[in-house]
Amino acid sequence: MKQTKIISSLLSFTIFLSCSVLAVDANTSIDESNSLASRLESSGQLEQINPNESYSNVISSETVTSDLQATISSSDLLDYCSISDETINHSALVEDASNSNIVREVYLEDGSVIGMDDAYNILSITDFSSEDSSDDVLYGQNSTIEQVVSYYGLQDNYQCNIEDDINGYIKYTWEKILSGGIVNPYDSVTLILDKDTYAIRVLNRFNEVAPVQTTAITEEQAKQIALTCQENFEAVTACKLTYVQPNFFWNEEQIAYEPCDILELVYECVIDNQYIVDVDAETGEIIGGDSYK
């Protein structure tokens, strides 16, 4: 009889543990009042997207100093890009929604726009014409890429992905690889080149350092949580650990939020090859996502 009671107690305890895991999987353990979304909203860090607002807003113009011109003129990176005219036309202090580290835009005479941080480091180059010609296609491609890799120190702990022939362009992306093979896409460099001349058309540098965070839920639990997000979800077709800026894509049907200026470790679950659900790897909260539709 005593043995039967012990077995019965063990079975009850096992059932209790199973129910506890299922509670996490169903995302019922999230305290909404203390959720990340609630905390960011309370602190004013959660902002709705304004459709009338551009990605880069000018705060004020600034005087072009000789030091700023000297910084531009002496930049090896601009030499690698073969900028045709490095003379500054004007400069402005800005707010950049795509890269919060860009605080200044410098407009050159050739039409190039240079995005810089507060230490005058170059983080983006767009809209420029290049002196490169198609006569040195192969040399220009290899030389330019090697120079950019060396300039930003991408030789170690960065993975490179190449997307060939995107509407006449080639896209190179280097992303930081952290411990355990986790990717931080916000410590990255993107380089877009003309497919015919291999001249650089766009360069972007993101240098957000990912905070050290741990996982408190498993990948399987994250997948179960992701599937509960929408009734029509059928299967998780891919899942990986990565860092994201929370955008709370699934929170409100009629409201779209700007990606928050923080990094969170998530299980990024792809659903039915159409949707992305970002599940916080520590709390199980759904903090972002997207749709391929």
Image: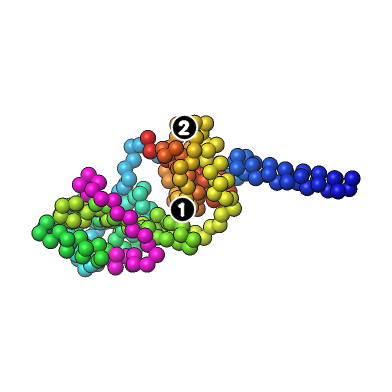
Task: Estimate the spatial distance between the alpha carbons at disc 2 and disc 1, rounded to whole Å.
Answer: 25 Å
Looking at the rendered structure, the secondary structure element under dot 1 is strand
Q: Residue 162: within the magenta? A: yes
**Magenta residues, start to end:** 149-169
Looking at the image, residue 97 sits to the left or right of residue 197; the answer is right
Q: Quadrant of the C terminus?
A: top left
Instruction: Name the residue: 45% across, 50% down.
Output: 244
Residue type highlighted by circle 1: Thr
Which of pointers 2 and 1 lies earlier in the amino acid sequence? 1
Which color mode does the image show? rainbow
Label 2, residues with CA under 10 Å away: few <14, some 14-19, many ≥20: few
Quickly name the residue at label 1: 242
Looking at the rendered structure, the secondary structure element under dot 2 is loop
Q: Position of residue 284 (x, y in %)?
A: 57, 46
In the picture, the disc for residue 202 is: none
In the rendered image, the residue lying farthest to the right is: 1
